[in-house]
């Protein structure tokens, strides 16, 4: 529970930075109506996300403005912009990452991993079997590539450094083998 709580803020900041920076870039490159352009959003999943987000805004009696739509779209949608089926967007989206050597497949894999972690955290599912230290490092790194100020916020507010070392999950012995502390065995997936 403490680990999940410590990851929630950094994951939230990553998601907000990703959606805001990606939207700003796609708006600049493809126009304000990029979400309604079938040459931009080419997959049924992406197009369905737009439809569902608009329907949700209508049910909530919120204005269907561009900003409201951006906020309503889920993390899966934003991650899908970097997937194999959206390779055509990479030239537009590559500049949002303030780092060299970034490749679309690596970003897509990280975002998929973050989505799984985010969903597990949000739905109170076990996360102990995941490589949490690496995921946290990747969250802060990717957030920094998108928005240094968002990464600074994570650094200033995150409880992760205080929580993670105190939780007896993984133990590395002298032979560099990682094993699970016996106290958490019953909580790990089979």
Image (tube, helix red, strand yellow):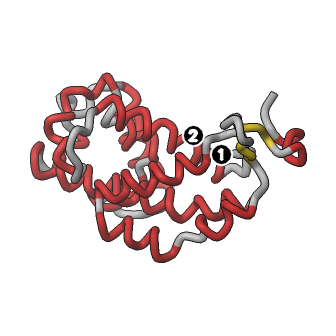
What residue do we see at 32% from left, 23% from top? Answer: 84
Is residue 88 rendered to the left or right of residue 50?
A: left
What residue do we see at 58% from left, 50% from top? Answer: 133
Q: Tag 2, which secondary structure?
A: helix
Q: Is 37 in front, or is 9?
A: 9
Is residue 96 rendered to the left or right of residue 62?
A: left
On the image, the x and y values in percent for residue 52 come to: 44, 42
Q: Is residue 47 visible?
A: no
- Looking at the image, which residue sits at the far bottom? 156
Q: Locate the C terminus and report the quarter of the image it occupies.
A: top right
Is residue 41 rendered to the left or right of residue 142?
A: left
User: Callout 1: few (<14), some (14-19), or many (20+) C-alpha neighbours within 10 Å?
Assistant: some
What residue do we see at 37% from left, 57% from top? Answer: 143
What residue do we see at 37% from left, 43% from top? Answer: 78
Q: What whole-number distance in Å separates the C-alpha atoms at marks 1 and 2?
A: 6 Å
Q: Is 43 in front, or is 115?
A: 115
Residue 116, which numbered label? 2
On the image, the x and y values in percent for residue 122 come to: 64, 53
Q: Look at the picture and state if 84 lies above or below 49.
A: above
On the image, the x and y values in percent for residue 64 come to: 33, 57
User: Callout 2: few (<14), some (14-19), or many (20+) C-alpha neighbours within 10 Å?
Assistant: some
Residue occupied by mark 1? 120
Q: Tag 1, which secondary structure?
A: helix
Q: Locate the N terminus and report the quarter of the image it occupies.
A: bottom right
Q: Are marks 1 and 2 in contact (CB under 8 Å)?
A: yes
Is residue 131 rendered to the left or right of residue 177?
A: left
Occupied quadrant, residue 44: top left
Q: Look at the picture and state if 72 lies above or below 162.
A: above
Q: Is 107 in front, or is 25?
A: 107
On the image, the x and y values in percent for residue 53 come to: 42, 47
């Amino acid at each position: 529970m403490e680990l999940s709580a410590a990851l929630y803020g950094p994951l939230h900041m990553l998601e907000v930075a990703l959606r805001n920076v990606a939207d700003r870039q796609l708006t600049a490159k493809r126009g304000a109506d990029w979400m309604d352009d079938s040459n931009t959003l080419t997959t049924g999943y992406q197009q369905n996300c737009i439809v569902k987000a608009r329907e949700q805004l209508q049910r909530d009696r919120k204005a269907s403005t561009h900003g409201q739509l951006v906020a309503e779209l889920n993390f899966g949608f934003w991650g899908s912009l970097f997937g194999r089926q959206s390779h055509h967007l990479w030239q537009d989206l590559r500049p949002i990452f303030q780092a060299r050597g970034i490749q679309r497949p690596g970003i897509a894999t990280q975002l998929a991993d973050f989505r799984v972690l985010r969903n597990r955290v949000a739905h109170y599912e076990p996360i102990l079997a995941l490589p949490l230290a690496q995921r946290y490092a990747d969250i802060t790194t990717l957030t920094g590539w998108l928005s240094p100020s968002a990464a600074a916020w994570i650094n200033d507010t995150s409880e992760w450094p205080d929580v993670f070392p105190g939780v007896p999950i993984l133990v590395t012995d002298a032979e560099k083998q990682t094993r699970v502390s016996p106290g958490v065995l019953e909580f790990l997936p089979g």
